[in-house]
Amino acid sequence: MPRGIKVSYLDQTFKKPQITKDLLQRVVAYFAAYWKQLTVSITIIILASILGLLPFFVIRRIIDIALPHKDFKLLGILIAVSIGITVLLGLLQVGQAYLNTWIAKRITFNIKNQMYHHLQGMAMSFFASAKPGEIITRITSDIDGIQDIFNSTVNTAFSSFFTVVTTVTALIIMNWKLALLGILILPAFIIPTRKVGKVRWEIASKTQGKISELSQIVQETLSISGSMLMKIFTREADEYTRFQMVNEEVIKLQMKDSLAGRWFFMTITTLTAIGPMLIYLYGGYLFIHGEITIGSIVAFVALLTRLYGPATALFNIHIDVTRSLALFQRIFEYLDQEQEIKNRPQAVPIAIQGKVSFQKVCFSYQPSHEILKDVDFTVKPGTLVALVGASGAGKTTLTNLIPRLYDITGGSVSIDGTDVRDITLDSLRQQIGIVMQEPYLFNETIENNLRYANSGASETEIINACRASYIHDFIMSLPEKYNTVVGNRGIKLSGGEKQRVSIARVILKNPRIIILDEATSALDSVSEMYIQKAMVPLLRGRTSFVIAHRLSTVIAADLLLVLEAGQIVEKGTHQELLAKEGIYKKLYDTQFRLQNTPI
């Protein structure tokens, strides 16, 4: 995508979400499916919060009773009880951690499946606009963040709430005066925490945007096509400078975030030291006046430290909730993108014979610019149709409407008398084969790339398809033969070899309708010869639409459709159109006839 053009779908910034009832209900729905496991988890949290109080009361009895009375037996029992409670708490925490992880993993599993399935159904216009790096981020790191959401937000909220409730209750029971002082100290922790939380949120938002920008640079310039383009135009130094600048901005923001956290923790550490001292001061006063025991003071201070962390987390849970909802919102933004091309309720599968009809077809990528206008034609099964016209006339767009890679904006496209929108997508596309100008191969073996068209194909069928496309002998000359890995986008094969593999793949599919999008335009004469031979068995008995680039294709066509500015201006056979001496005759004289002119 050219630099400087903004994507019309979604940008990559990490924006503060609009918290609505609908958003909250959607988030809760993912967790509600596991309400039984959540109930068990919350029960464990409550039990752990109550059991967590017992060691503090044990400490009080050790200091107030066992030690002053020199009761070693009681001391042993109390210590054993404390150890037992600690072990039990540890087991409960392990069980809860396992349960929480299980819930989080199942939720992320479901959302990833939902996201992938949803994106599979998106129209080609979505993929033409959305950045590949952004799609990967949404379906991987954004969704993986759900696990952190559950552990750091949901779990923290419940755990902090019950810990605060049980701890405050215990403090009041022990001494309401000290409890009141301890609660009055809490704002000293909460206020700086809220302030630093807001600052770190703003920094994190900016950091997320810059990290996304850095990822986009990597994805664009270090992909095979981007890397080649960078080398050809010798832009390595410029791209390195751009990467370095964005990377430096990321580091500065991360440093700023880290320092904000350091100042915060220094403040909290100082307050943590001052708070207990105040309790000791007032507790000492109460002890001197006989209102409290030393054991109670020690246990009280220990309990107070148990209160600070959860109370602070609870008062600032809105920060975690906001971050969490922002993550969910990014996910929902993709899930809410409309699947423009989908099965109609009345859609049915059909067995295609090959009659194709366009009736007053109009199409535009953008409302303001119409690409096809009132396109009308009908071809019988088995017809070879050549599409002729200048670049940008609408040839590729026309062929993309047949398998519904895009939907028309006016008129109708029908196959065997049935509107393509009334045919199930699977049924329609399973019976249409496309050979593109730039064939796409996965970074897999040749055999696996071929089986993508027909996973159940036998070895004989694969070999026959490759023989028909004149690629079998070449494959057998390779050390690994059909197990040869072709590299990223088939980079280890030449253009002609990739094209013949792609033709073999379409032959294995055995479609009723074939579309060839200038399949030989970028090939040398030898490769073109092989491709032309390979096309003979591919086109035989099938309805074929060929975007013509070579004279031989034009002459062999049963029907020529000449497009200009999105309209069919002429139609007929090669000889018929030559006789008209119209637009086709000019194209023939200036383009096709030159192919036979000796240099």
Image: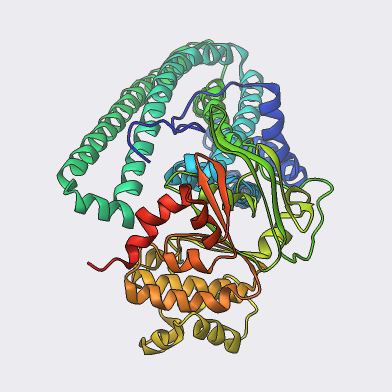
Residue at 45% x, 69% y is 552
Q: Residue furthest right?
A: 346
Q: Is residue 200 above or below residue 98?
A: above
Q: State the residue at coordinates (64%, 55%).
A: 403
Relative to 380, does residue 494 appear above or below in the rendering?
below
- Please indicate, yes or no, whether residue 72 appears anywhere in the rendered image: no
Nearer the observer, 38 or 256: 256
Quarter of the figure that contains the N terminus: top left
Closer to the camera in the image, 244 or 154: 244
> Residue 500 is drawn in which quadrant?
bottom left
Which quadrant of the structure image shows residue 573? bottom right
Q: How many marks do you count on the picture?
A: 0
Q: Nearer the viewer, residue 113 or 323?
A: 113
> What percent of the width, then of the height, locates residue 308?
50, 24
> Looking at the picture, how far across and down is residue 492, in whole percent?
33, 72
Q: How is the image coloured?
A: rainbow
Residue 527 shows up from this direction: yes
- Residues 225 and 50: in front is 225
Is residue 475 left or right of 458 when viewed as pictured? left
Residue 378 picture location, percent across and down: 69, 54
* Placement of the C terminus among the 4 image quadrants: bottom left
Residue 362 vs 457, above or below: the answer is above
Q: Is residue 399 above or below residue 462?
A: above
Q: Position of residue 372 (x, y in %)?
A: 57, 40
